[in-house]
Amino acid sequence: MKFELTEEQTGFAEAITDLMRSADSVAVARSWAGGDTAPGVKLWGRLADLGLTALVAPEEDGGLGGTLVDLVVAFEVLGHELAVGPWIESAALSPQTSGEMVTAAAAPLAPYAADAQVARLLSGTAGAQHASIDSTRTLTEVTGGEAFGAEALDRAVLAAAAQLVGAGERVLADSVTYVKQRKQFGREIGSYQAIKHQLADVRIALDFARPLVFGAALGEVPVSAAKVYAADAAYLAARTGLQVHGAIGYTAEFDLSLWLNRIRALVTAWGTPAYHRGRVLEAITDQKQAG
Amino acid sequence: MDLTLSESELAFQAEVRSWLAANVPAEPLPSMDTEAGWALHQEWEAKLAAERLSVVSWPREVGGREASLIEWVIFEEEYYRAGAPGRVSQNGIFLLAPIIFDHGTPEQQARFLPSMATGEKIWAQAWSEPEAGSDLASIRSTAVRDDERGGWILNGQKTWSSRATYAHWGFGLFRSDPDSAKHAGLTYYLFPLDAEGITVRAIAQLDGEAGFAEIFFDDVFVPDADVLGAPGDGWRVAMSTAGNERGLSLRSPGRFCAAADRLVELWKLNGADAPQSRDAVVDAWIGAQAYRLFTWGTVTRLADGGEMGAAGSVNKVFWSELDIALHETGLDLLGADAELLETPWMDGYVFSLSGPIYAGTNEIQRNIIAERILGLPREPKGAAK
Ligand SMILES: Cc1cc2nc3c(=O)[nH]c(=O)nc-3n(C[C@H](O)[C@H](O)[C@H](O)COP(=O)(O)OP(=O)(O)OC[C@H]3O[C@@H](n4cnc5c(N)ncnc54)[C@H](O)[C@@H]3O)c2cc1C
């Protein structure tokens, strides 16, 4: 029993982080949102070279044969550093050993295909495009298309949960930095209990969501449990992060907005909290629930 | 990363499980805060001790079986899963014993630990005072040096002392240097609750039972042999257990997982009548799982030589709120019957309500998390603490 990451796993997370920071992943995300996907495609290629899309593909198929824990490690960083592109689809739902950027719809969990404007649609016919609250996600309607197996879908849900934890951590870290600097009434706002206690609650929520995500990767709890808690924790981080930033947090130009909107999108993408609560109930009572 | 148990851990688990299955009383014991229940709880402690299961992690000489931290958590999980009685000796074994191990003299260890392990002597924690709750360092009860008799004279009043109504010994902090301010000049004393000059007055709790008490000290003599740690060093000594109380030792995941399992069973019976409780049932179950997994992470860290530190505060806020949520949801599912005092749900609920208050209120824990984990600025002087 050793419920912690190995040195290789922490090293892997650091490697992804370093690569994304040196490529200025936030600037990349901003161009992606503005319609220029070239820098994003380039960064994608470099991350794919690290093995991200092939991570959990079996070795006999040319993949890295990584575990779901490895997948969680990677997606937490992708969330923290605001990766753009259909990572959930290309690395978790349908791992691509070639590093190719693919996308898919998987109703009812993900009724739209993300980023079909740049990625190859795995199956079905692309229809109308819609904007998302997350300006780095373009959503495409798909008709026809094949269904994915339960295992593939669970991997995608797990990846979304891990990404939420990473994004929530980032918002918390940025919020802590901000409240230590911003002064009102003659002192740092972070010295006021009303601010402290809200951020402490975010710390608590994230600290308990992360073990659930790793626990789900190890098969200890249903992935739906992880998605519910990760979404709740990240959303609390987002709401609190916005509040403690005041109006600057409400500004599109301020980078925090990118994470706030990413979190809001991922709360309902890959299964709404209500959907996943229903699945958890089914799993713990061994009975199908009506509705 | 893995959660698999070793051969020997699995063997330990199997042994504990089968012993508990054969020995846990079929009917829950009466409340430990009644005279009859107290005696039965002491008997239960003795039964556990005979099997060296009352203090599994302690050395063999003092009644334990030198179980590892992992085995301790395994034991706790099995204990609560089996529906075994609450631990009447918990203040002593979880809050005092770690200090006696770290700061006690060999003589104190030999004198106090074995009878604590068997449940023969039950201990009460006498820290809070009427004017010193969250601001514990402002305590006023005094200790004055008595060189002639080789000891100290205690005066003052303690309050909210759990189980002091029937307990045998108490441990507490007193101001031994009258000129000292706050944390300095406090000393840690051990004293029999039937000592001359001590008066214990029971205080009824929310459910009417005398779960805690006030303790009055009127020129109570404590010999030097019953001072724990160095005189004047009481605060540091005491704080080395505060982390325990908030963290692992008092609240093992087994309690919450067992309650969550009972909640799921109750949902299967009554859920159709209370569909609005669905999310609360699911969230409470997930919460218990999150707590279990979080604990394994903590155990891994501690086993690797890490320290609990301020992380105990994260733990405390979470378990105390989870405990209330679990029981509130249970009451909702019982409908009108929830009101009945005899259900284990109401018992558990009333107890859970004190969680955010004792062991340092959740407001104080949030301050600790914000200041020591997130690194936010302390309150300016005079604003608080
Ligand atoms: C069931 C139960 C068992 C107990 N058992 C024991 C025992 O065995 N031994 C023992 O010594 N004590 C025991 N206690 C006492 C417990 O430790 C205290 O109740 C606790 O420390 C809080 O102190 P207080 O009750 O005086 O509340 P106060 O300190 O007066 O607090 C009242 C309210 O003000 C808030 N507050 C206080 N200071 C601050 C601050 N700086 N910032 C923000 N909010 C603040 C608190 O959070 C709380 O909400 C027990 C309490 C209960 C309920």
Image (cartoon, coloured by chain):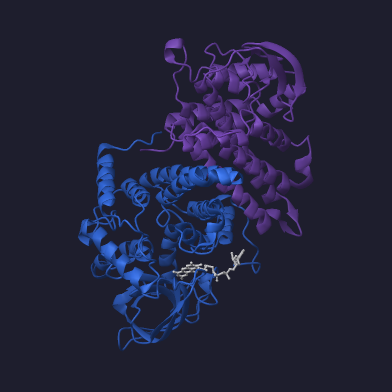
Chain colours: A purple, B blue
Front one among B81 and B274: B274
* Residue B269 image point, x, y percent: 49, 45
Q: Residue at x 48, y 54 (%)?
A: B312
Vertically, is B225 above or below A99? below
State the quadrant of the C terminus of chain B: bottom right
Residue B384 position by quadrant: bottom right
Position of B141 compared to A32: left or right? Answer: left
Position of A27 compared to B162: left or right? Answer: right
Vertically, is B35 above or below B216? above
Vertically, is A78 above or below A177? above
Q: Residue at x 53, y 58 (%)?
A: B338
Front one among A10 and B193: B193
State the quadrant of the N terminus of chain B: top left
Position of A203 compared to A243: left or right? Answer: left
Instruction: Specify whether residue B229 is in view.
Output: no
- For ligand 1, give the image quadrant: bottom right
* Residue A79 image point, x, y percent: 61, 31
